[in-house]
Image: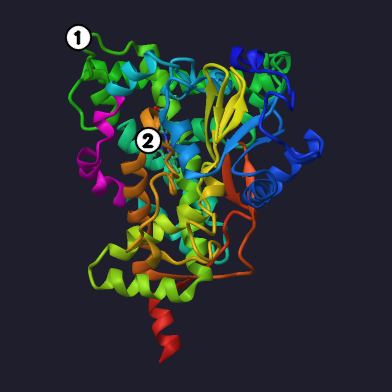
Amino acid sequence: MSDAFAREPRWDPKIFPPAANAPRVVQTARMLSNPQGYGLSLRRRLGPVFSLRMFPYRGALVCATDPTSIRAVLTDQDRFVGGEAASFLAPAVGAGSLICTPPPRHLRNRKLLLPPFHGKRIARWSERIQVSVENELPGLLGEGGGPVRAWAQRLTIDVILQVVFGVSDPARLAVFRDALNEFVGMGNLTVLSLPKPLQRDLGRYSPGGRFVRLRARVHALLLEEISTRRAAPGADDVLSLLLEARDEHGVGLTDEEVRDELAGLVMAGYETTATTIAWVIHFLAHNPVARDELIDDLDAGSDTLLKATITEAMRLRPAVYSSIRTATRDTELGGRPVPKDAFVAALFSVTHLDPELWPDPEAFRPQRHLDANVPPYSLTPFGGGVRRCIGTAMAQLEIETVLRGVLKIAVPEPTGPLEAARLMSVTIVPAKGGRVRMRGRALACQGES
Ligand code: HEM
């Protein structure tokens, strides 16, 4: 575990907000099996700011669930600082990645990274994203009753490779795809939750050994790509823009910094986008009225309902369950004590289901976002403040492109009940991967006639 975990204060009910009495192992199990339901039940019993005694936190994760405390956690940088809470990811993404960089370095690197992810620039790549979606569509339609998440994971890797890394050669794409799939998938990253000694390379077949080998392969590929791009600058992709970026002193990122940022972008952008795609399509399959209204709206050339539909899915099941910071000093939140160095979560996955903010919160109603008048910080699936997700525009463009492509030719239908939400690392995933059946739209029309 990193320094931040070593400094974390031990559990003491006098210095933390109230917690449930259940043992840590029980609270962890309940969070993993029903993250939002358990969070809501704790909030009802303990109030909007409470402690969650969950692994890997030795003390407790202080959870903020009302908009006022969420705003404080996300924006009050004097009291709550980001970066350290994600430092356990450093062995995978490299300590230089934005995700785990504390200030002041974070702000300098973020300024260099932001321009390529600006909405207008990302829009230029929409054709490239569309081609990826079209290439992958047969896989989704052909799978009958398949889990959308697995399909969306393949798509997301492809989009990141093409838009972010600028890889287009099919052979090179295949090599990269294999290396990344093995590195970020297949349980490889669970090694990060093991105690430090077990994370080490203890031989070829140890989890640490496998992790180190796969990481070396990904790093070598990234460095090759960086040196090719340095030799022939000016290509139209995020990597080339990153290599050209300079801070106010005219200093750019080193090869190792760029490598870490690229690895971080894969980590941050892959599961999150794929999981959101799975939830949106799964919810549409289970809500035929909203689904058919969306299809009609898209057919009419509008994207009003498209955006509202994605927002509604992200309200109900935000891909990331919270944004986490550490307390810089002894402080308070919502009138409750928070000790220095405690981990503090803006637990927006619970806020999104607050019936006072969102009437009939479990209902999938995209229309509610057309005239939404909710307090600020009631809906923050991309986090907030100086660490708000930099991939927001890219993720939205990708999800919109997927929905347009899919719904033009197919109608998602349920294959069973709505799937429960599970917590996998920091991601809220559908328990069975978001299964749906895809009915071809021509067939749908024949069926109705
Ligand atoms: C639906 C898809 C996505 C969701 C739900 C999502 C959500 C989030 C959240 C909640 C955070 C933490 C914000 C905070 O701490 O306040 C974050 C950070 C981040 N995301 Fe995303 N993300 C998505 C897609 C992407 C994509 C596509 C990329 C880039 C390819 C990306 C890159 C990042 C980076 C680099 C950070 C760290 C920002 C920082 O610390 O300054 N994300 N994301």
Assign a secondary structure to mark 2.
helix
Quadrant showing the N terminus: top right
Q: Amino acid at mark 1?
A: Gly
Asked if residue 270 is positioned above or below residue 129 in the image, the reply reads above
Image coordinates for residue 177, horizontal then vertical, percent? 46, 36
Model colouring: rainbow
User: For the point 52% across and 17% down, which residue is it?
Assistant: 328
Q: Residues within 10 Å of mark 2 (few under 14, many from 20)?
A: many
Residue at 37% in and 42% down = 159
Q: Horizontal and vertical percent for residue 383?
A: 43, 38
Q: Position of residue 122 (x, y in %)?
A: 25, 40
Q: Position of residue 97 (x, y in %)?
A: 43, 20
User: Which residue was labeled with disc 1?
Assistant: 250
The residue range painted magenta reads 113-130
Q: Nearer the viewer, residue 57 or 275?
A: 57
Residue 175 visible in the snapshot: no
The answer to whether residue 200 is magenta is no
First along the sequence among labels 1 and 2: 2
The amino acid type found where label 2 is placed reads: Leu
- Compared across the picture, whether 124 is left or right of 441 comes to left
- Residue farthest to the left, as pictured: 234
Q: Quadrant of ligand 1?
A: top left
Residue position marked by numbered label 2 in the rendering: 161
Identify the residue at the far front of this view. 335
Q: Is residue 127 magenta?
A: yes
The quadrant where residue 119 appears:
top left
409 or 331, nearer to the observer: 331
